[in-house]
Amino acid sequence: MNVLFATVEMYPLAKIGGLGDVAGSLPKNIRKLGVDIRVVMPYHRFIEADSEHIGNMKIEQEVYEIHHTTVDEVPVYLIKNEFLCKDKVYGYQDAMRWAKFSRVVATLPEFLNWDVDLIHMNDWMTALVPAYSIKGNVKFLLTIHNLKHQGKIELEQFTGLSLPENRKNELIWQGKINYLKGGIMLSDAVSTVSPTYAKEITTEEFGEGLHEILKKHRDKLYGIINGIDYEIWNPETDENIFANYSKDNLSGKDKNREAMKDELGIDDDKPLIGFVARLVEQKGLDIMLPVLKEINDAHIIILGTGREKYEKALKNMEGKYVHPIIKYDEKLAHQIYAATDMFLMPSRFEPCGLGQMIALRYGSIPIVRKTGGLADTVKDVSEEGWGFVFEEYRSEALRKALKRALEYYNKDAWDNLVHRAMKQDFSWKNSSKKYVELYKRIL
Ligand code: ADP
């Protein structure tokens, strides 16, 4: 089976959020199952890779250089073109950039003379690939990592896409050209990154305006939970943290906690809670901020960047118990997962969420809202699970869950809970098999 995996982020070449993590780990796990999967992505200007220029592709007047590299044994085609490749992944004329990229993806198999069975697209950035595809026998899977971003442009801009007029109707939604809607219409299957989110997005509350379309296509809608890269996220070998540890010997975890406390000037024995996320509404900051104001029985370490209003609000709360660190820092993220006792994810919605899975791997007990992938991966302690789960999107519900967690922390049972958490398996082993099953179903 030959699969082309199209993305604009891939760890470690380029990562902004969860999509980067997935693109960096899913293809290599699918490859282990015997599928010839290869990645195609833009050669962003900041990418450092040993690559080989294998030829040029010309589409209309534009020239695209095709470079080849390998990442963890996965072949990666890097597409170089001035309009496409910038100093950051996002934030330019993205709708037109990604349309051009999608056209390149659709044309790449012919250029390579490679018999591709299926193109696996990721989010709106590559949703137009089937619209540009000229080969009749290729199948398409569109994975939605975040429904909020859809790629919308005005109707008049349709001509700029260089698509045949008869494609227009499939792309129109609520008076605009909507890339993601087009991708949903034109793909053989659509998947999202957890079973619960796959159900949620057919409702008005979570559908981001596309729920009617998704409901109509629910027969081809699937939910497959993401995994995390167990080589990168491994407390037994992680070189970013202060001391290594395993579920059977947690003394290293204590060293990580102590090192973090020294760094932050904490001199009491109260538990540490971590929060590592983009600082946007999705992540539940609106219900979290009021709770932070009153916290005095634990320390919360916040690592993130995002909307200015949240960055400012958090900075203003810096004090004895609230430790905001406003930056993007991969190494520090590892240290926080390792040092903390609990990990907070009060998301308003969460397609999958990787933070809670990483936290479990590092024995940091997740406190989460029951939505999307959080509902699929964290079971409450009251049901012999490994986390603290609350339902309502309200500060009061979060406050109660936090209180339950802090009370539990003082019991002897805490160590058992940490052990149980670290025993859960959120590697790609199961989920990569599910993707291959889905590929087979489509073909
Ligand atoms: P999303 O994809 O919505 O951003 P996920 O939980 O799926 O959320 O994935 C977020 C990933 O990005 C995790 O690996 C998390 O550790 C990482 N991350 C988020 N913010 C930061 C930051 N400021 N510094 C380092 N890593 C971060």
Image (tube, grey):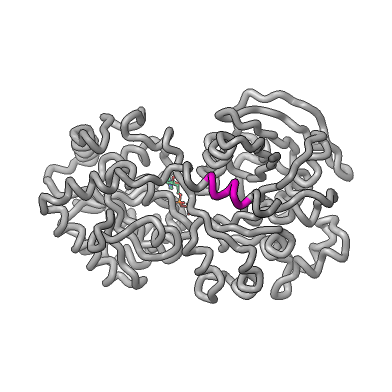
Quarter of the picture holding the N terminus: top right
Q: Nearer the viewer, residue 438 or 113?
A: 438
- Is 212 part of what is drawn in magenta? no
Report the residue at 65% width, 33% height from top. 76
- Horizontal side of 251 relative to 308 (left or right) equals left
Report the residue at 23% width, 46% height from top. 418
- Horizontal side of 374 relative to 344 (left or right) equals right
Quadrant housing residue 160: bottom right
Residue 217: x and y, percent?
A: 65, 69
Quadrant housing residue 8: top right
Give the main secondary structure of the magenta stretch.
Answer: helix
Report the residue at 55% width, 55% height from top. 145
Residue 142: x and y, percent?
A: 65, 55
Specify the segment rendered in magenta.
432-438
Residue 319 visible here? no
Q: Nearer the viewer, residue 408 or 341?
A: 408
Residue 295: x and y, percent?
A: 20, 60
Image position of 214 with respect to 334: above or below = below
Image position of 315 with respect to 390: above or below = above
Image position of 335 with respect to 357: above or below = above
Report the residue at 43% width, 42% height from top. 427
